[in-house]
Image (tube, helix red, strand yellow):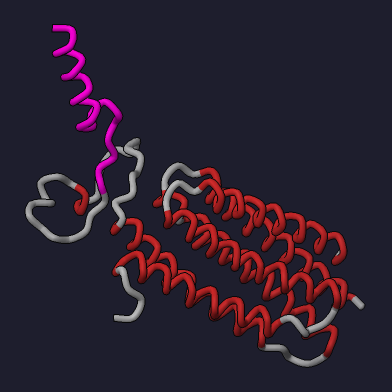
Amino acid sequence: MLDTALWVSLTLIVLAMAMNVYRLAIGPDVPDRLLALDTLYVNSIALIVLLGLWLNTKTYFEAAILIAMLGFVGTMAICRYLLRGDIIE
Amino acid sequence: MTFFVITEGLISLLLVAGGIFAFTGSLGMLKLKDFFMRLHGPTKGTTLGIGCILIASMLYFTVTQRTFHVQELLITLFLFISAPVTGHMLAKTGLHMHLRFITGTRGSVPELRDEDVGQSRVARPARAKHPWHTRKAKKRSRFKQRETA
């Protein structure tokens, strides 16, 4: 049962990431692409967690924490740049 | 034995629910019409899906390794705190850049009504214009009239 659920979840997450990449490519404005990138890193965290479940190790969770924090900081920096024209005033 | 079967079912349910939520969020981001609609999918659906998957992982490692794991709860908390902040900043960026939005909705919020705008310096979204109402189209039509006259 767990194997089947893992397969279903992996398929859905990979499809979601494919849709994010498509929106990242066609997004008409800059905030659209930024939103697509933000969703892409969130989905990549899910993919890393599912890889940890698949291989039955806890090695990759530090990578997940790192991606979460740096992705948040990166999105904030680009938002500040688009809003103010400068990141740190 | 029954405990393990129930836990496995719960973990499987959480995994599938998380996958469906993340998929729905990304589908909303792909299919909706303008930026302010597209913002709704990832900020709610994807965050909930990630929370479901991380809690499933936490349950799995807690049951199999017989020790309580909090790292996944840490990621979940951080994502649940950071997602609304990201959504707010992205909405502010969209308002600041005067992105177009579709006008199919009846009734407008007070901030977007014409009589409340006045001389305020507050950043507000650009009105979505039909192609025959833009200044260029008017110029073009005037030009055409002059040409025919």
Nearer-the-camera pick, B20 or A74: A74
Residue B65, above or below A39: below
Residue B69 coordinates in the image, percent (x, y) = 71, 88
Write down the quadrant of residue A7 in the picture: bottom right
Image quarter (top left, top right, bottom left or bottom right) of the C terminus of chain B: top left
Nearer-the-camera pick, B45 or B129: B129
Q: Is residue B75 within the magenta segment?
A: no
Residue A43 coordinates in the image, percent (x, y) = 64, 64
- Residue located 27% across and 35% down the image: B129
In the rendered structure, the answer to whether residue B73 lies left or right of residue B135 reads right
Residue B89 coordinates in the image, percent (x, y) = 38, 67
Q: Is residue B128 within the magenta segment?
A: yes
Nearer-the-camera pick, B67 or B7: B67
Image quarter (top left, top right, bottom left or bottom right) of the N terminus of chain B: bottom right
Residue B135 coordinates in the image, percent (x, y) = 20, 32
- Residue located 13% across and 51% down the image: B117
Nearer-the-camera pick, B135 or B46: B135
- Residue located 10% across and 58% down the image: B120
Residue B147, above or below A10: above
In the rendered structure, the answer to whether residue A36 lies left or right of residue B102 reads right
Magenta-drawn segment: B126-149
